[in-house]
Image (cartoon, helix red, strand yellow):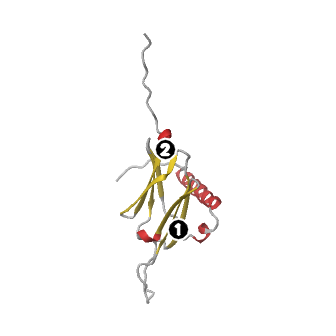
Amino acid sequence: MAITRWDPFREVVSMQNRLNSLFRDFNESEGPLTTASFVPAVDIYEDAEKVVLKLEVPGIEEKDLDVRVENHTLTVKGERKFEKEEKQENFHRIERSYGSFYRAFTLPSTVDTENVKANYQAGVLKLELKKKAEAQPKQIKVNLAA
């Protein structure tokens, strides 16, 4: 059993982040969001060389994913289809979300939009966006004055 520190504002911050994401996506898109059935979770992090996004999209085939970069905006669209048509209504519970999704992310100007890698493994879509050479940190050697 793990002990977890109670944070009274954790749920409020989580809700605020979700609402901000929803409104940001709504402002950046014209319509696809209104038909989206679910919004996959995403982790975004960066290091000195790249920005990485990992989207949880299990059960979606590679052919049903559409990743595009246009005007420093990265969009990811896809659709999770029902695996099997059931003629009888004998489901006990359906908790997984099905249908289409749409996510849009504004990319920083430091990202090289011509150098994007997409990998899909174990239900996670991993997008790596390399940073431009001039955006990467450079170490400057300090010389002692004689």
Q: Mark 2 or mark 1, which has the lower sequence index?
A: 1
In this rendering, the answer to whether 14 lies above or below 137 is below
Left of 111 or right of it: where is 124?
Answer: left
Q: Position of residue 145 (x, y in %)?
A: 44, 12
Report if the CB atoms under discs 2 and 1 are less than 8 Å apart.
no
Residue at which label 1 appears: 101
Q: Identify the residue at horizontal 56%, vertical 59% (top origin).
A: 104
Residue at which label 2 appears: 132
Left of 27 or right of it: where is 108?
Answer: left
- Give whichever of 112, 58 is nearer the camera: 112
Q: Position of residue 24 (x, y in %)?
A: 61, 56
The residue lying furthest to the top in this view is 146
Q: Identify the residue at horizontal 60%, vertical 59% (top origin).
A: 25
Q: Amino acid at mark 1?
A: Phe
Q: Quadrant of the C terminus?
A: top left
- Give whichever of 42, 141 is nearer the camera: 141
